[in-house]
Amino acid sequence: MGSAAQLLFPLITLWGLSAAAQAQTIWNVASPNGIQATIQAASPGDVILLVGNTIYEPFILDRGLTIRGNGATIGSGPASSGGSVTVTVPSGQLAHLDQINFTYGYSPFGTVGCPVDLAGAVRIDRCAFLTTNGSTPLTLSNADVVIVSSTITCSGTTSSGTALLGFGSRVTLRDCVVTGSNAGCHPIAGCSWTFPARNAAEFTNCSLHAERSSFMGGSHSTSGFPGNGANGLITTNCEVWLADGSVVGGNSVAGSGGTAFVHASTVTAESWNNQMVAGAPGGGTSSGPVATTTPLLRLQLQPVWTRGLTSSLDLHGAPNVVFAVFLTPARTSVPTPVAFEPIHAVGATALFAGLLDPFGAGTQSVAVPNQAALLHAAVWCQAVAGSSLPLRASTIAGGLVR
């Protein structure tokens, strides 16, 4: 850790990563319609690699597989029977979606995107979700989802849609951008059909833990018809922790600006080092019980686990606080009482522990073994801190080993 921090038990070489390298089959898919057949042939824990320079057909994922896209695009053309993706992961299994663009879908009016519906335990890394046809790009229902370094966008001037919807789910966001659609009008109808600006994200009966992420409500920029700017984030009956991000209400040229954060709950949302920006004119920064707390615990990993390289784990939180960092399978959904932030470290292995320094900071270097079997292994870690309630937990960091 940093010079003023004290380690209680360092384990600074990730030999524990070897446990994540389970026996698995690697499936290479190059044909546009090859994903579905491969899913049906694969077993939980297997890895599907998308290797072709093509637009892949949408699919239904019903088991705990890893699909690694290397920037591949999922969508459908005029001859396709459907343009959406459904992921439903059985209990006890975990699916991973890595570097995939769910962004293409045919329409006479242009690309409309590929809506995705998720249920079960799913980890998402470096993906893009986009629709421009009024549907929601990403919907979470009874899900346990971690989304890292991804964009979720509904855009276009001839449509409207909320970008991210969550129901009964536990949701973690790290380094993500969520954008609701702006107001628009239908050009063929001479703007007699109008579409309102939409919120960036709406969650109901969820826990939301967001770090270094932004929520931007859509704006109303057409003066020819009235309408308000949208909200950045709406949470109803949710537990919410936000750190180091921004929540922005949409502006309006023919109405009122949106509110950045609308929290309709009896449980106070906790916010640390966030920008809450009201939409103009007359929007609000927040409504409902929202409080600035003592520093929320933050864990950053640079670079992401790469064989043969050393990564830096940087922690920030309250000064002189006891902490522990765990390698976690992150499969088990844990209830989130008010006294705790969402804990993913069930069945986890301790990596190291200690005290944050008087400035609330600390750094540990971790070496990743250069083992061929670690490629595509799913390795996540989480920090937990505090000696009394409420305990603090970071969002989980890590992903698929490169």
Image (cartoon, rainbow, N blue to C red):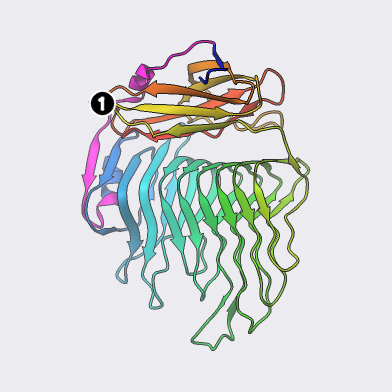
* Residue 31 is one of the magenta-drawn residues: yes
Q: Quadrant of residue 219?
A: bottom right
Residue 266, quarter of picture: top right
Where residue 162 appears, as percent x and y from the top left, is 57, 61
How many other residues sit within 10 Å of disc 1, few (<14), some (14-19) or many (≥20)? Answer: some
**Residue 152: x and y, percent?**
49, 55
Task: Identify the residue at horizontal 74%, vertical 59% (top origin).
Answer: 284
Residue type, numbered disc 1: Ala
Left or right? Give the position of 381 relative to 275: left
From this view, report whether residue 383 is shown above or below residue 258: above
- What residue range appears in magenta? 8-35
Outermost residue toward the bottom in this view: 190
Is residue 93 visible from the viewing direction of this image? Answer: no
> 230 and 67: which one is in front?
230
Q: Position of residue 154 (x, y in %)?
A: 51, 63
Name above or below for residue 273 compared with residue 75.
Answer: above
- As drawn, the residue found furthest toward the front would be 3
Horizontally, is 290 left or right of 190 in the view?
A: right
| Percent x, y of residue 109 | 41, 77
Q: Residue furthest top?
A: 9
Q: Name the side, left or right, on which 78 lies relative to 337.
A: left
Give the SS element for disc 1: helix
| Front-lying residue, 371 or 203 | 371
Q: How many badges with numbers are in the image?
A: 1
> Residue 400, relative to residue 216: is it above or below?
above
| Residue 380 falls inside the magenta stretch | no
Give the residue pinned by disc 1.
373
Quarter of image, res 230:
bottom right
Taking the spot 36% from the left edge, 50% from the top edge, the residue there is 100
